[in-house]
Amino acid sequence: MNRAADALLLQHNLKALNLTNMARHLEQQLRQARDGGIDYGQFLLELTELELRIRCESREKRRLKEAKFPLLKPLETFDFEAVPQLDKRLVRDLATGDYLKARRNVILMGKSGAGKTHLATALGIEACRQSKRVRFVTGYALANELIEARTEKDLNRLLGKYARLDLLILDELGYVPFSKEGAELLFQILAERHERGSVIITTNLGFADWTQVFGDPNLTAALLDRLTHRAHIIECTWDSYRLKQSLKGGEKKAS
Ligand code: ADP
Ligand code: MG
């Protein structure tokens, strides 16, 4: 057999083994190996590393897309110096994803503009980078999605989809009160995830005000009990970042 025929066969085998990236880059890698005098072991190592790297990159891209973040704001764009009250070490620690392994929740509470959504998104992006399944959704949108699914007799499928996530990010819980049905369905999702998968919640409400949003005090108590059990609670007590930035801008202009 000649070299070209072997390479063709090899490419075919790689594809049959689902090693498509190796197949795609085979020719170029073979050429490089020959030109550079690379030995068999190193050649195979480089080719397999390439396959793994490309797979990992495309998985990350897929996870980011599936997560449906409204804006891609990673931790690199979060200005820790602007919010010295924030426990930076805790955020860095959360970014490692250990809380996901421990199935712990994170609750970000505080005023509008404090950076809760930014932090939740950044942690979600970190999770995607670790190949985790993430979904970002507002509490209101999720409640509506669940109600709609129930009407269309598609609720079980949707519940299954949410149960499979490694991380559910529920943004803006509390801005809009839920209907009775919405509250019950949301409770169901969160109860099912309890100790099975993590949830990050951002909210402008203190715990005492949650009944206003969920309606039923018993349901709210049961929900809070599960959600806050072993949760990291981050109280964003500072003023709006945006407001601070515009005030700063104003100061600069004035001086
Ligand atoms: P919240 O969800 O608490 O209402 P957001 O996360 O939406 O607040 O923040 C409001 C805006 O300010 C966003 O554009 C966000 O990216 C920005 N922001 C808030 N805090 C910071 C920060 N510490 N560093 C950089 N940008 C920030
Ligand atoms: Mg927000």
Image (cartoon, rainbow, N blue to C red):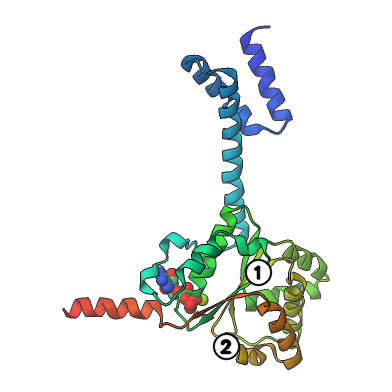
- Circle 1 sits in a helix, a strand or a loop, which is it? loop
According to the image, label 2 marks what residue? 206
- Looking at the picture, tell me which residue is in the foreground, 39 or 10: 39
Marker disc for residue 31: none
Q: Quadrant of ligand 1?
A: bottom left
Residue beneath the point at 77% across and 77% down: 188
The CA span between labels 2 and 1 is 20 Å
Residue type at numbered disc 2: Gly
Please give the label number shown on residue 104.
Answer: 1
Residue located at (36% from left, 73% from top): 82
Q: Amino acid at mark 1?
A: Arg
Q: Secondary structure at mark 2?
A: loop
Quarter of the image that includes the C terminus: bottom left
- The correct choice, above or below, for 1 with respect to 201 in the image is above
In the image, residue 230 lies at what x, y percent?
66, 74
Q: Is residue 12 visible?
A: yes
* Residue 168 x/y as whole percent: 65, 67
Indicate the quadrant where residue 159 lies. Answer: bottom right
Residue drawn at the location 66% of the way across and 79% of the way down:
228
Mark 2: give few (<14), some (14-19) or many (20+) Cα within 10 Å: few
- Going from the N terminus, do you reach mark 2 or mark 1 first? 1
The image quadrant that residue 97 belongs to is: bottom right
201 to the left or right of 37: right
Residue 193 image position (x, y, % from top left)? 74, 70
Q: Is the residue under label 1 in contact with that under label 2 (CB below 8 Å)? A: no
* Residue 217 relative to residue 110: left or right: right
